[in-house]
Image: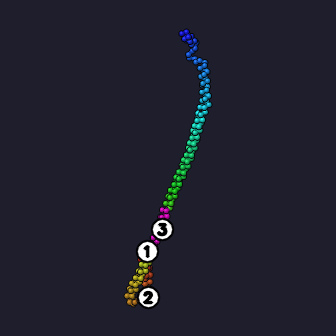
Amino acid sequence: MQTLTLLAAGEEGLNPLIPHPVEIVLSLVVFGLLFLLVKKFVAPAFETTFADRTKAIEGGLAAAETKQAEADAKLAELEKRLGDARHEAARIREEAREQGAQIVTEMREQAQAEAQRIVEHGKAQIEAERQQAVTSLRAEVGSLATGLAGRIVGESLDDEARQSRVVERFLEELEAAPGGVS
């Protein structure tokens, strides 16, 4: 019991909250070895992994920026083409309107020319029929005049020259009259 008392008395001088100096030194050595092992083997592996990830992310960002720039360029080109196509379509529509107006004008001119030709042909036909009617009337009036003159004079006007002179003189008198034949 005495030994227990001595141990208890010897322990009274030590503070249970402060570790023994041997434990402090041993803990520092183990901590130093763990620190060196982590620094030598684990940290470089993490660093290479972080560096690879950083490069992959930066490469992905660069690729994304490149793709975005290409997409923007293509979009601008497509918008330009669309604008050009719209201008071309407007130009074609305008040309079609002009051609339509020109065709309408040409068709009107052709219709007017055809109408004029028909009118001229009609006038010519009417004039020909009029001349034919005048000639027919002259012949008929001439034969009637010759027959009447023969009855009045009492002699036959069978002689062609005489008959012709009588008819011409009669027609000239008719034309000279105020309401005569034209």
> Count of labels shown?
3
In magenta, the rendered stretch is 103-122
Q: Position of residue 90 (x, y in %)?
A: 51, 54
Taking 21 as reference, is 68 above or below it?
A: below
Residue in view at x 61 percent, y 33 percent: 44
Residue in view at x 59 percent, y 20 percent: 23
Q: Residue furthest top?
A: 2
Q: What type is the residue that disc 1 sits on?
A: Ile
Name the residue that disc number 1 marks: 126
Name the residue that disc number 2 marks: 160
Sequence-earlier tag: 1 or 3? 3
Q: What type is the residue that disc 3 sits on?
A: Ala
Name the residue that disc number 3 marks: 113
Viewport quadrant of the C terminus: bottom left
Q: Which quadrant would residue 157 be assigned to in this image?
A: bottom left
Viewport quadrant of the N terminus: top right
Mark 2 → mark 3, Cα distance in angstroms: 48 Å
Q: Position of residue 72 (x, y in %)?
A: 55, 45
Q: Is residue 45 visible?
A: yes
User: Tag 1: Cα neighbours inside 10 Å, few (<14), some, or many (≥20)?
Assistant: few
Tag nearer the camera, 2 or 1: 1
Q: What type is the residue that disc 2 sits on?
A: Glu
**Display coloring:** rainbow
